């Protein structure tokens, strides 16, 4: 740009030396102004586009953050439910263990089997059978 516009056109006091050089430098000056104006316009458009992109990026970041926060809360909720389930399982396991402690052991059941086999309860008679047998015996004695 300095090549097109030079200070040699001015005198020592900063004034132009001739009218012809004044007319010749104006078109150069206005073309440079137009060119600079166009560059500024392009830069402004680029800056506007960058601002729009930044705004879209910020909105995407906020949306992504909201989704991640929602996912995080959901995971925390699921973890808390799993913790409650584990506590319930522990409680039930403790109850089962305490119930099993109060149940008979294998050795105790074996002892009961031996006594039952020794007594042979199948040969036991019922109360009705005994009464019937007594009635039958009494009936025979009366007939004799």
Image: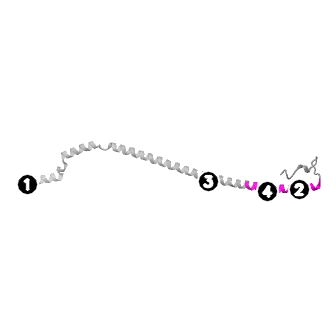
Write down the region rendered in magenta. Answer: 18-46
The residue at 12%/53% (across/down) is 135
Is 18 on the left-hand or right-hand side of 71?
A: right
62 vs 128, nearest the viewer: 62
N-term-proximal mark, 3 vs 1: 3
Mark 3 secondary-structure assignment:
helix
Give how far apart the Cα atoms at labels 2 and 1 are. 159 Å
User: To which residue does mark 3 refer?
Assistant: 63
Quadrant (top left, top right, bottom left, bottom right) of the C terminus:
bottom left
Q: Nearer the viewer, mark 3 or mark 1?
A: 3
How far apart, in angstroms, are the residues tagged by discs 3 and 1?
Answer: 105 Å
Q: CA distance from mark 2 to mark 4?
A: 18 Å
On screen, residue 128 versus residue 43, left or right, reads left
Residue under pointer 1? 140
Measured Cα–Cα span from mark 1 to mark 4: 141 Å
Question: Rounded to the nearest whole Å, what is the CA distance between mark 4 and mark 3?
Answer: 37 Å
4 or 3: mark nearer the eye: 4
Marks 1 and 4, the one that precedes in the sequence? 4
| Percent position of residue 17, x then y | 94, 51
Residue that badge 4 annotates? 38
């Amino acid at each position: 740009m300095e090549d097109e516009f030079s200070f040699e056109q001015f005198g020592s006091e900063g004034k132009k030396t001739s009218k012809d050089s004044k007319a010749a430098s104006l078109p150069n000056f206005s073309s440079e102004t137009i060119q600079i104006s166009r560059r500024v316009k392009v830069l402004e458009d680029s800056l506007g586009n960058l601002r729009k992109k930044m705004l879209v990026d910020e909105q995407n970041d906020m949306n992504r953050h909201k989704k991640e926060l929602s996912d995080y809360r959901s995971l925390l909720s699921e973890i808390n439910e799993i913790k409650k389930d584990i506590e319930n399982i522990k409680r039930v396991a403790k109850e089962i263990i305490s119930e099993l402690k109060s149940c008979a052991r294998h050795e105790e059941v074996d002892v009961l089997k031996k006594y039952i086999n020794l007594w042979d309860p199948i040969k036991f008679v019922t109360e009705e059978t005994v009464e019937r047998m007594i009635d039958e015996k009494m009936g025979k004695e009366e007939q004799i």
